[in-house]
Amino acid sequence: MSPLRFCRVFSGLLLLALPCVAYAGDEFSQFRIPANSYLDWTGGASASGNWGYQEAGPDRYSSSDWRGSLSSALTRWSEDDHRSALWDAALSVSGLRYRRSTLEHGPYYVGSGNYEVSEDETKRATGERATVSTQQSWYLGGGPWAVTGLLYSSIDDGQNWDWRRSLTRQLLDPLEPTLVIRSDDAETYRSTLNASLGIGFGRVRNATGVFEARVLEERLRRLGALTRPLSTHARERLSALMYARDDVSQVSSRPASPVMDAVERILYEDGALRDSVLTAAELFHVTEPVFQRYGFATSIRPDGLPQSAFTRMTGWSLNALVTNGHSRLSERRSGASSTIVYAAGAPEPPLEARSSSSSKRTSDGTRLSLRAEYHRPSGMRTQWDASTTFDDQLGGGERAYALTNQVYWNFIVADRWLAAASASQSRNTRRTQDHVTIEDAWSAGVSASLQYLVLDHVGLGVGASQAWSKHRDDRYWSNDIDPHAATWSDGGSFSFDIIYRFAGMSRIAGVIPAVMGN
């Protein structure tokens, strides 16, 4: 069996085996998305400038540019068991002014004597951009059937003006210079409109908040801040807060105060909160990330709550989406130049030239997307994720489709152990209307890793991956000899890292006693 076929069969078997994972009742399967929403409207302005001057003998160089922009963005999000809706709108205006002056001297390549060239250049540019998009899903009756709609529209408009003046003078005969004046301007207008409509069955939920809420509860119990385990209702409220806490971070640069106040209120109303106050060391233990990835320590979140090392998704869904897109590009360019040659100090009649061009291009296409995904948190330590995506270009100048299968497995072995494995397979094809293959590519790969970290003592990381790919193109020269000729590649990688701290000590006289690295 070839490696590509093996990976296709392997990932397919894993995808089929995922539903067989024990579906013991846990909090992940019972999690329901809390009603949450946020509105964020921001505006900004910026301005900057640069300038420079340089001398090299008789030569002179100077330049300067000034630029500025105005922008505003609006985001609106709402979600509950029956509907999710995202609205985005953005507007920006920018401008640029650039100026350059040079004076250069040098020898002629042909003939004798030296030349002197002085140039002045001025550029101006403006641009405007506006985008509006929305993505909404309706879950009929709060059940598994869903209707999804997407709309994206953008307009870009840009203008450029360029003016140059160049005077070339032969130093042996300064009465016969050449003066060239040129101006160019261009305008570009681009508009894009994409609309999608789809239907799906099933629902995938982000249940990371369940895991993070349980981590927070276990830490508080271990530190003695809770008199007993939280009730089911309190755990549901805490999970809902963990799920929606990013909404607060979207609209506040200091989200810790309202989020931590909500945590305290949930614990107090449940009657499980002890009256004692946490020490500074205990408080910062509560805020630590769930896992510090080896070599990439995760910092404390702005809201001061623990964060999972990976997303805990749960549920499954089957979706079909049809997208129709239309884009239009208009360009206009014009230029003019005037060349004046002086003879015996008197200008001759100018040689003038003008040019202009314009173009318009439109493109339309329809794409069909099919997606199936399955996510299963198997207990608090294990996460399974799998997905299959198929995209088919139904209209346009080319026929193309892409198929991708992915399977991921993450396992928290212990507090600072993390194991992960993945397998993927994809195929992409593109053919012209004359059935000429532009691209026919297969790829497959597997990877595994193990990360272990004991703070200030031992760090260990092991990883391995293997990838196979095949690429075929009818335009390749060897296809005239062998129509099935293709490019094969096979490669892998292996990594092993270890860090060991033999000794460590920190002492600040009169402030804290000696701290020994553990």
Image: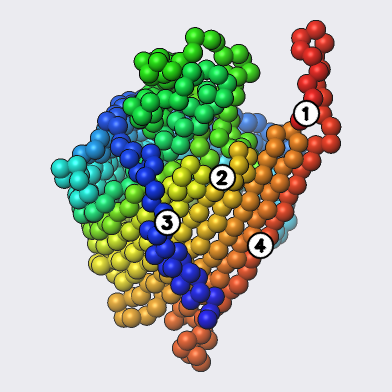
Q: Nearer the viewer, residue 441 or 45?
A: 441
Q: Could you tell whether 25 is left or right of 179 in the image?
A: left
Q: Amino acid at mark 1?
A: Gly
> If you read the primary sequence from the N terminus, does the residue marked by circle 2 or circle 4 appear first?
2
The spot of residue 9 in percent (x, y) is 46, 72
- Quick one: SS at disc 3? loop
Q: What kind of element bears circle 2? A: strand
Eye-nearest disc, 3 or 2: 3
Camera-near label (2 vs 4) is: 2
Tell me which numbered mark, 1 or 4, is placed earlier along the sequence.
4
Residue 517: numbered disc: 1
Measuring from the top left, give residue 498's x and y in whole percent.
Answer: 75, 47
Residue 489 appears left or right of 375: right
**Mark earlier in primary sequence (3, 2):** 3
Image disc number at residue 412: 2
Circle number at residue 21? 3
Q: Which residue is mark 4?
A: 493
